[in-house]
Image (cartoon, rainbow, N blue to C red):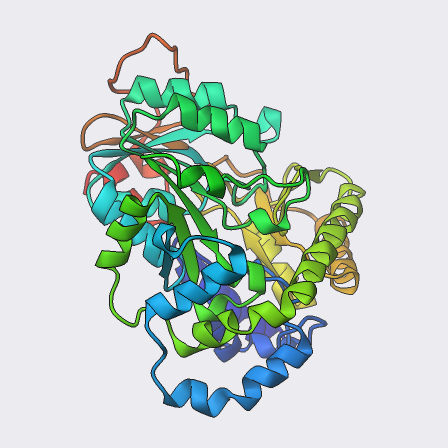
Amino acid sequence: MAEAGSNVTELFRASTAHSPSYFTLSRAGAAGHGGAGDGPGITDFCIPCNPYFPTPAMFDDLGDRLRDILTYYPSSADTITAELCSVLGLNPQTVAMGNGSTELITWIDHLLVRESLAVPVPTFGRWTDQPMETGKRVDMFPLPETNGFALDPASFVDFVRSRGSRTAVICNPNNPDGGLLPRHGVLALLDQLQDLDLVVVDESFLEFADAEADSSVVADAVLRPNTIVLRSLGKNFGLHGVRFGYLVANPGLAGRIRAALPKWNLNSFAETVVFMLKEHQTEYTQSLRLVQRDRQEMIWQLSRLPGLTVYPSQGNFVYVRLPEGVDGAALRDRLLEEHGVLVRECGNKIGSSSRYLRLVVRPQPDVQRLVAGLERTMYAAPQAPPQRPAAVPVQAQGPALVPYQGPVPVPASQGPGPMPALALPYGSYGSGTAAVDRLVSGA
């Protein structure tokens, strides 16, 4: 087991912004660990799936149709989108479906983002990496740990104004911390930023929230000239491998994205699942309730571990800060090698560090296995020396990205201009993302 685990953990050191895929880990020997999870050999707390949907009967149905799904072309995206809209009660003219939310983020960047984009960090990596890869300036607003990484809309608006950003993005709930801005807070932010080129609200994990009856601003987005709401189907339905998601906006914005998307960008698996939804809405709703229940239980269990800080979450994952002196990368490797538990260590997330883990919500038997592994690994042996927190890079106007530790002062009166650089050598910062590191080093 130790030899196979060593081969597997090497893959994390070779990775950049994301963890190795499940299939890469399986080929490297992770399947030999004999875990209690759904996968062959590991209990996966890394990939944020819905463990209760599709149901076993739905998977049997998909299996029975597998030959046809793989043999034949799918219908047009318009046909699949129309069916999805009939299930969700949306106007197809306000919707564009993509081959995963990442495809839609790419087209939003290419078509609608001009010179700059503001986004709170830490957050989903494609919202920082994608615009950088196309030469945009990314203005990163550090979320304060002292406030549980909660986003303060007024401070973010002040930051957008001070930087002169033309596009703003928020993830609600945010990934990796699961923080949720109430609907009235999102609407207030949209009102204050209505003069921007574009405001995106990424609601990819919102289906798992239960803090209020309805936190979505989908109905409002279709009435606004500069607003897009992004939703993920793979995350909600526990089907990341299918790759499907959608955005909602006014007909002009949505139509512009639809016109740019490749023909047959949706696959036959996506079509089959979408056309199964009407008859399985009850099971889907029940799956969300089970995840919400499991989240509460998991937060309670983790909060009992000495020195572990657990942040509030409305996603299907929980963000935790490890006790003083515990290195997340070393802990991740030992959990996988010794306990067959796979976790998401966040040292390669901008605005986070190796002292943080994002842990996916799973059923209680799996959580008990995680907690037992954490107890044996964190408290039963000497720990690694404390790690210096990763720097939060703040983009200045111009080509240089300045690494900066600590909160960023953003007086409302400050006009666009470079942020002050602290005496931190460029070589000391590694984001884990090649595009970011090139900007930092000036290469």
Q: Is residue 63 above or below residue 251?
A: below
Give coordinates of residue 315: x percent, y percent.
Answer: 61, 47
Name above or below for residue 205 compared with residue 48.
above
Residue 73 appears left or right of 9: left
Give the percent coordinates (x, y) of residue 392: 41, 32
At 32% from the left and 35% from the top, the residue drawn is 226
Q: Quadrant of residue 120?
A: top left
Q: Residue at x 67, y 73 (%)?
A: 55
- Snapshot quadrant of residue 390: top left
Q: Is the C terminus in the top left, top right, bottom left or bottom right quadrant?
A: top left
Front residue of 224 and 348: 224
In this view, the residue in front, 62 or 152, is 62
Left or right placement of residue 200 versus residue 42 in this view: left
Q: Position of residue 134 (x, y in %)?
A: 21, 46
Q: Viewed as shown, does residue 22 lie left or right of 363?
A: left
Query: How many discs mark residues in the rendered view?
Result: 0
